Amino acid sequence: MDLHGFLKALARRWPTVVVCLVLAVGAALAATSLSAPVYEAGTQLFVATRDGGDTAQLSQGQSFSQARVQSYARIVTTRQVTVPVLERLGLRATPEELASRITAQAPLDTVLIDITVRDTEPRRAARIANAVAERFTEVVERLETPKGVSGAEPKSRSGGGTSPVSLRITQEAVPPAVPVAPRPLLNLAAGLLGGLLLGAGVVALRETLDTTLKTAEALGEFTGLPGLGVIPYDRTAPKQPLVTAGGHSRRAEAFRKLRTNLQFSQVDNPPRIIVVTSSVPGEGKTNTAVNLALSLAEAGVSTCLVDADLRRPCVAPAFGLVQDAGLTTVLIGRARVADVMQQVAGGLSVLASGAVPPNPTELLASARMAEVLTELAEFHEAVIVDTAPLLPVADTVGLASLAQGTLLVVRAARTKRDRVRTAAESLERVGVRPLGTVFSMAPVPKGGGYDHRDYGELPAPRPSVPPGEPVVPAGARAAGER
């Protein structure tokens, strides 16, 4: 996933980023409010040599002090310093605990040692810092005092020996007025940054695990088939699932584009019998088949729509037609095609499914089905066949081999890649000619009112028609989703 795709994913999944941001900021604020304030008191010591006199001796002493001062800073947290400080101040802590609250630093090219102490009480922090500085001075001077002849270590303060270095406190610690921790602004900034990183990570993980296809371009790259149409989601689809001749909605225009692309996709050998199918239910195949047929009839193409989904037929309810007499009636020899063919406004011929049979797979793959399709193709320029989904049942695989081309409908951000691949491979195994894909229920641009929850299965309003004309669309519950 490139940067542009990742930014689009962030925009699409912005609620996830907002939730992560709120959680991280909330955690930062909670940590700030629950943390006890910590105060820091500091003192500073100056390290000098006792040898004084001419300039050469002073320079040598300066170099000696700078060479030793880094080692002195490491002595501050040793038990020689912390244990006496604990005893002197009567603190209830271990030497290791006290050492963890002490920091000593010796800036480069200086003879200064900065000692800082952290504590939850400002006065106690100052007292500990001053006590540590005093004890540290004693320890260093004792360590630097040369031993006597007998091997005893004389004390420099008692006159038994002289230490070559001298430590003096240049700045005593005072109780701090402002705590150094917690730092609300820093914690808030860390929470904001952490929330953004967490949100971006969650989005990247979801995009990696999400195997659905989000764009028509991604669908084309994945299947290698031309994308013949992108059908956007339309908020008015539940009330009017069928496009009308005079409609100028996004959805109506999308079906007109699908019609045009289909007509120009196979100029040298245009297919007349076209099967419309999908991998699983709920991808909009019936809606696509019905509206494609209406769009072709609108353009003056003699079109017949066949409901070959003998599992869950939906075409007849979409138009308010009789469903009991239709395709199955013809296949079992009880009627001719002309006897059960029904007409709807706009010049579209509809062959309903008829009664639901117990053996739809055998009927659809029979020689009689091939004869019916051939007969329909003789009297119509285009025969659009709505079929059952490919993966749940085997009905469409046998029927598709009788057609001259197929359209594979894929629902945006819902159909998984493995299902699309399996569906395409199943068509290829039977030698079906793939015309292309239709990307259905695609999100519209921002401000277009896209909301997948509104794409329901509600009945369409029954429009008024001139006397003698068949009633057109009513009750298209399944047509909107199948």
Image (cartoon, rainbow, N blue to C red):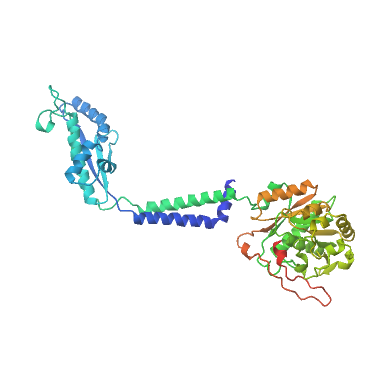
| 211 to the left or right of 422 | left
Q: Which residue, as the protein is rendered here, is positioned at the far front? A: 358
Q: Position of residue 206 (x, y in %)?
A: 56, 51
Question: For the view shown, which residue lies furthest in the left direction?
Answer: 159
Return the residue nearer the eye: 167 or 413.
Answer: 413
In percent of width and height, residue 317 lies at: 76, 68
Q: Quadrant of the C terminus?
A: bottom right
Q: Is residue 28 left or right of residue 378?
A: left
At 50% across and 52% down in the image, what residue appears?
199
> Residue at 79% of width from left, 75% of height from top?
465
Q: Position of residue 1 (x, y in %)?
A: 59, 46
Q: Residue at x 29, y 52 (%)?
A: 179
Q: Residue at x 24, y 45 (%)?
A: 93
Any part of residue 173 in sight: no
Is residue 419 shown left or right of residue 431? left
Q: Is residue 191 visible?
A: yes
Q: Report the label total.
A: 0
**Quarter holding residue 62:** top left
Which of 268/118 is in front? 118
Q: Position of residue 174 (x, y in %)?
A: 21, 48
Would residue 240 appear left or right of 174 to someone viewing this image? right
Give the quadrant of residue 229.
bottom right
